Amino acid sequence: MSNPIRRGVKRVVRFLLQKVVLKAIARPIRRRLAQFEAATHAPANMFGGFGYDAVRLFAKAIAKAGPSPPPRGVRDALEHLDYAGVTGRMVLTPNDHNGLTPDSEVLIRVENDDWHWLPKYHG
């Protein structure tokens, strides 16, 4: 059996690290959300992320296809992109136009102020 004091210290350290990491991630996100909402006078929602990723994917495909590309060239470039977007990592292929990789979808359960990753979750 492990020492209950050691277990308690580990839990406190893990909890504090999670809070620090979440705050570090949340701060720039909150700032961007505030900028977006001030500029659009509308609340942000998940569809903004989808739109952002769609525009970025299209821009990357055009850039990859070269100057003045034909539509087929853009399509071919799009079908060979590996893109880390705000909605997840996408690896597009001629047979997979969704492209979201399994590691883009995760499920985390919070139990007793502790985070538990559920690795067997597959959207």
Image (tube, rainbow, N blue to C red):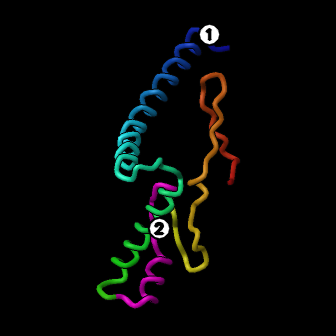
Q: Which residue is mark 1?
A: 4
Q: Tell me the magenta residue range.
A: 69-88
Residue 64: x percent and y percent? 36, 78
> Considering the numbered disc 1 on the image, is that residue within a helix, a strand or a loop?
helix
Which amino acid type corresponds to the residue marked 1 in the rendered image? Pro
Quarter of the image for the N terminus: give it.
Answer: top right
Q: Is residue 85 magenta?
A: yes
Q: Is residue 68 above or below residue 49?
A: below
Q: Is residue 88 visible?
A: no
Decide which of 54, 43 is in the foreground and name it.
43
Q: Which residue is mark 2?
A: 54
| CA neighbours of label 2 inside 10 A, class few (<14), some (14 to 19), many (20+) | few
Q: In screen coordinates, is 84 left or right of 99?
A: left
Which amino acid type corresponds to the residue marked 2 in the rendered image? Ala
In which quarter of the view is residue 66 placed? Answer: bottom left
Q: Residue at x 69, y 48 (%)?
A: 121
Label 1 or label 2, whichever comes before in sequence order: 1
Quarter of the image for the C terminus: give it.
Answer: bottom right
